[in-house]
Amino acid sequence: MERSIVGSHSGPGINRRSFLRNAAAALPLAYAAGGQTLRANAAERASAPDNDAAFPGVIVRQSKPENYEFPFPTLSTFHTPNNLFYVRTHFGIFGDVDLAAWKLKVEGHIERPLELSYEELLKLPSRTQSAVLECSGNSRVFLVPRAEGVPWELGAVSNAEWTGVPLAAVLDQAGVKSGAVEVICEGADAGEIGGNKEEPMSPGKIYYARSLPLDKAGKPEVLLAYKMNGVDLPAAHGFPVRLLVPGWYGMASVKWLQRLILTDRPFQGFFQTMAYSYYERRAGNPALVSTTELNVKAQIARPARQEIVRADTAYRVHGAAWTGESEIARVEFSADGGKTWADAKLLDKSVPYAWRLWEYSWQTPQKPGSLTLMVRATDARGRAQPMKRDPDRRNALVNHVLPMEIEVR
């Protein structure tokens, strides 16, 4: 079925599939890795030809619902191109949107119920903010034993420039009543959740919804975003409007936003409590708490896993590092499985809430053999990547140091 956008800025009746196919025609589907050519799971993409046209080069982790991974070894720019930005959905990409009829509703514990059209939202003062989004399950495939959920490797993370209206400005228009504690953010995507360890059976059809405490919702960087890297949001990323919550895991940045509900009590929705939660030890006992802030993390883009590199050669090791409501202060590299560490070079300047690119000039060993590379980051608050996995994090929040096995020949 063709998806179309009715009444968008690009003109009525635009066919998204044909537009993206033409826009992406020149993009390569492969990247070089140590003299070999590695394809972004071409066999998997071939099984989903419609998606392949819209998302050339991404790795298909699931085709229905759509869950696509950024091929992390291709990392070369600060901002991830829109058609390579990872996609996470629970019920599939939301379909046709009639902008003439679309409204953002604000209700609940407020003085003035509010409905904003798309055009009215665009007339409000805007802000542009770079921010990294990471799925809380990124790197899940490396957990032992195997964990339930989408089998993300390194690429359920991307960085973009977002433009939108601060959420606080809209809440001010509605007039938040005394006693309100959270704002529930509801998307237009809905469905039923099947039973598994990651997302137990839900009670019938539900909308995707998450809440923010008002102190976070009031931060100027929290946006009702309508542009991504300078263009209207693609359908896969929440067209026409999504929430953007910099510094928190991607599940907080609700896509296809349709309602904001102010509440005077903590939200206990499915995606707030049963899914996207982890154990926190309280007096020695585990208690489930909602996933929020990003953990500090660094990843190696190149060399890629199992890449073959030449012996006795200068090699540029590089990647990205990110954290939550702080900034990356240090990245360290190890070529001997963590026995010794050396400082990597942080590139460019630090941008709040965005990832930090880094590199390390490495002289490969003279003798051939297998090596285990590692990288770890520390942020300005002193939070460092742990060497071991914390089992209280259930099947997500994977930020411990991951070994990268390569071959020297």
Image (cartoon, rainbow, N blue to C red):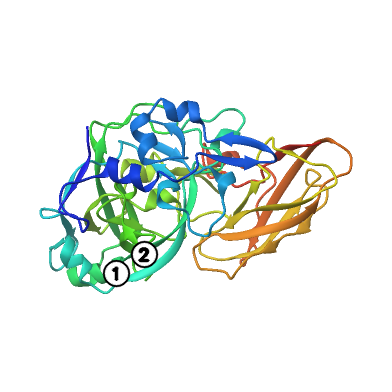
**365 relative to 143, above or below:** below
Q: CA distance from mark 1 to mark 2?
A: 8 Å
Q: Outermost residue toward the left?
A: 101
What amino acid does circle 1 point to? Answer: Ala
Q: Nearer the viewer, residue 370 or 394?
A: 370
Q: Outermost residue toward the right?
A: 367
Q: Position of residue 190 (x, y in %)?
A: 25, 38
Q: Nearer the viewer, residue 44 or 222?
A: 44
Left/right placement of residue 11 relative to residue 236 reads left
Q: Nearer the viewer, residue 66 or 91?
A: 66
Is residue 277 something that shows in the picture? yes
**Quarter occupied by residue 261:** bottom left
Identified at 34% across, 49% down, the residue is 237
**Residue position for label 2:** 222
Q: Residues within 10 Å of mark 2 (few under 14, many from 20)?
A: many
Identify the secondary structure beneath mark 1.
Answer: helix
Q: Residues within 10 Å of mark 1 (few under 14, many from 20)?
A: many
- Viewport quadrant of the N terminus: top left
Q: Position of residue 272 (x, y in %)?
A: 36, 46
The disc at residue 168 is: 1
Asked whether the beta carbons under mark 1 and mark 2 sit within 8 Å of each other, the answer is yes
Left/right placement of residue 22 relative to residue 10 reads right
Left/right placement of residue 141 relative to residue 120 reads right
Identified at 72% across, 60% down, the residue is 344
**363 relative to 94, above or below:** below
Is residue 64 something that shows in the picture? no
What amino acid does circle 2 point to? Answer: Val
* Mark count: 2
Identified at 38% across, 64% down, the residue is 216
Identify the secondary structure beneath mark 2.
Answer: loop
- Viewport quadrant of the C terminus: top right
**200 relative to 115, above or below:** above
